[in-house]
Amino acid sequence: MDQKDENEPGPSNNNILYRIALNDNKAGMEGLDKEKINKIIMGATKGSRYYIHLTNVDQQVDQRIEKILQQKALLTSSQINEAQIQVDRLAMELERRRDLSRVIVHVDMDAFYASVETRDNPELKGKPMAVGTMSMLSTSNYLARRFGVRASMPGFIGKKLCPDLIIVPPDFNKYQAVCKEIRKVIAEYDPSYLPMSLDEVYMDITDHLEERLTWPEERRTYVKADNVQKDNSTEAGVVMTTETSKPEQTQCTSPVLFEDSPSFLEEQNLSPPMPDTAKLEKPMEKVIVFGTSAEEAVKELRFRIEQKTSLTASAGIAPNKRLAKVCSEKNKPNGQYTIPNDKQAVMDFVKDLPIRKVLGIGEVTEKMMNALGIKNCADLYQQRALLSLLFPETTWHNFLNISLGLGSTNLERVGGRKTMSTERTFNEISSPEEQYELCRELCKDLADDLLKEGLKVCVRVSGFISDGKPQNLITNFLCVRRPIKKISLETMDKVVQEMPAPCPQRESFFNQKRAARQQELLQSSTGKDNTIKDQTVTNPLSEVPKNDADEAKEKPDFTCPICFMKQEDWGLEGFNKHIDECLSKSPSSGYSEMPNKGEHFQRKMTANNGGHENNIHANNIKNKIVTIPSCDDLNDFIIDKNTLNAIQGNQVSEADQKACNSEILSEDVLNNIKKQADLKDINKPTMSTPPSSSGCIRDSALICPVCNIQQDTTDLTTFNRHVDICLNKGILEELKDDKKNMETIHAPAHQSGITERGSSTNKPTLRSKRPGSTPQNPASKKARTSRSSNTIKKFFK
DNA sequence: TACATACAC
DNA sequence: TATGGTGTATGTA
């Protein structure tokens, strides 16, 4: 491939440069030397893992395209004609329902993070800067954009493009504070605005406009504030009598946004139209009267934001969210664009609109569409019948809506957050210690996040009931104990001070070994190398003996989980070989009896169970993590067994010496327990624990931590059953409440004043304490459960 | 249901 | 040296 091709990115090219090359589809990036910039980017990218990754991903997309083209080739004209009739029928129906009654505004702050940083640090003025890290830039200022530096570009490439680039680490607390100020202004125009991120909101100003018509002029009149950063005097009607502005203050275009790029904007004839009200355009004018139209109202809004924060915003005004979003990009920065509420105006606008400009059409979709000869919305409409035959219903319906310029006017946020997750990108790590360390970090982060959100985690583990199957316990215990040993202590410390030993139940090392061996036997004739050893090495969580996160740091602990012999001189290979041998010697049942050689472990379990080693069994272990919604926000989570097991595994900590049962309870529950029993004593290893008693409550009366009632039993199983019922009762009560809410809550958001969604992005809804359970999203509880379990579970796979 | 993919910011 | 983190929606096996 020659250089020329490589520097002409485009989805139709059969290379991935279009993914890598400068995406200049951003305000402030017009007229750049793309060839030069792309050469630098390519130089920094080619051959990297990232490049390889992109190549792979792109190949998959190409395959999809290939498939679609094949399907297309098979279509007959009669099929297409028939589809055309169906699709047009739907199009007519959609047209009939077109809603042109609302005035929707999308407000988008210009280079938000970068502008905030520059505003707060005058030294950055006039210099190319970006907010982010060497790995990733969140945004760049307009001067940096002239070098090709933009958001979603790694900082090190930014530095290559612009060696003087200053990279400022993000300060989200600061942005949040600014965001709050901005939203206060926005709420005056639409208390039910819909925040999408810190720097973006949708508003419906229809009601405001209606009301605005009745306002006297004073109410639409503003005076430039003396200090744009202190805008307490910019309230309409107030500032008229507060002569705070000074003659030297000129028309207030943002000192932050434009100080570094005015000439560029002039060159491009993109001088910010803001505010283009005649009076405002006179530099020395102090008093500004805004009109009553949508445009004027939005200009006023942007003016006030700028007065208050010294930051500029751009806006789009249109009959629906989709179009408003496109419009806000149109005259960025510091501009606005309007599509009147008129069908013809909408269609005219949409006709030449490149599909990629539409929210939801990304690189992949664009490439697929291009392969079908579709570039803009007119093409999209043209090909509607074909698309209906090639794509799933939801997808082609969406395409049809896009091509007709249709979109939602609903600013209600459906439900609250559905998942919470933590992830980290890391270099290849083969060391188990590092893997576990990462694992621990992730757990800790997630637990912290859960706690920050007011979610409480309740983990309950109970019962080592004698049933004659001790090996399950042993193998599972060994499997999970070490790898995840510390994590839980670190992650859950904020909930509970000390954790007794858990009894993890995830797929054991032993089981995995056995399964692998069986598979190996099955496949031995095929000659495939699918050895246990391989699995041992590739599955970090099955690498029990070599993965002791605590001990391996000092020296590897090669204690065989089958025979319990410890041999520090073994290498990994030797160790695996030994395990193979041991496994091949072990009875096919594998778990039917305590290994004779297991003295080491037996000793531990003897200690754990107060000397009742013969009663150590595990098939009755109950593991649960329930994260209970706090009284004031967010979701409930029910984390699945595997997750719990993993976390419990970490909680083992000094499990060898401690009791095998544990309870990790919510703070409230824990407090209850604390009142009833001395936790310090509870967590101390004891040799006098009755075999069936919980390690947590063995020295005190069995008082249910949920209902707080003393149980008339000393039998742990019975007790646990009771606690189970109690916990479930709680959930059932919540479900009942939800049902009640469904029946009683109907008032639309705007009827109840400022709504949650208007007040905070992070706490998405005020309408319900538990947004996921609101009538808007009755099924979300289940969904969340599944999602949350997935996200955590992934860490332990 | 679980997982993969696409997308946004 | 080096290409993020978090969340949602949707399709598919």
Image (cartoon, coloured by chain):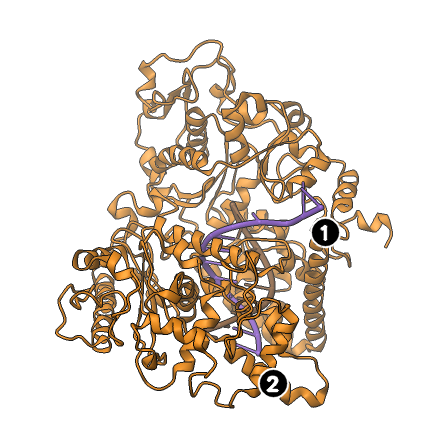
Chain colours: A orange, B brown, C purple
Chain identifier of the residue bearing label 2 in the image: A
Residue A559 rendering spot, x and y as whole percentages: 53, 71
**Which is more toward the observer, A535 or A52?**
A535
Q: Which residue sits furthest top?
A: A247
Callout 1 secondary element: helix
Residue that carries the numbered disc 1 in the rendered image: A18
Q: Quadrant of residue A698?
A: bottom left
Amino acid type shown at disc 2? Gln
Residue A196 rendering spot, x and y as whole percentages: 45, 46
Residue that carries the numbered disc 2 in the rendered image: A519
Q: Is residue A603 left or right of residue A572?
A: left
Q: Is residue A245 left or right of residue A731?
A: right
Amino acid type shown at disc 1? Tyr
**Which is more toward the observer, A673 or A578?**
A578
**Compared with residue A66, is residue A124 higher up or lower down, i.e. above or below?**
above
Depth check, mark 2 against mark 1: the one in front is 2
What label sits on residue A632 in the rendered view? none
Residue shown at the point (35%, 86%) measured from the top left: A468
Q: Which residue sits furthest right?
A: A2
**Compared with residue A130, is residue A251 higher up or lower down, i.e. above or below?**
above
Crowd class of label 1 (few under 14; some 14 to 19; many from 20; radius 10 Å)? many
If you read the primary sequence from the N terminus, does the residue marked by circle 2 or circle 1 appear first? Answer: 1
Q: Is residue A361 left or right of residue A186?
A: right
Q: Quadrant of residue A435?
A: bottom right
Residue A250 rendering spot, x and y as whole percentages: 50, 15
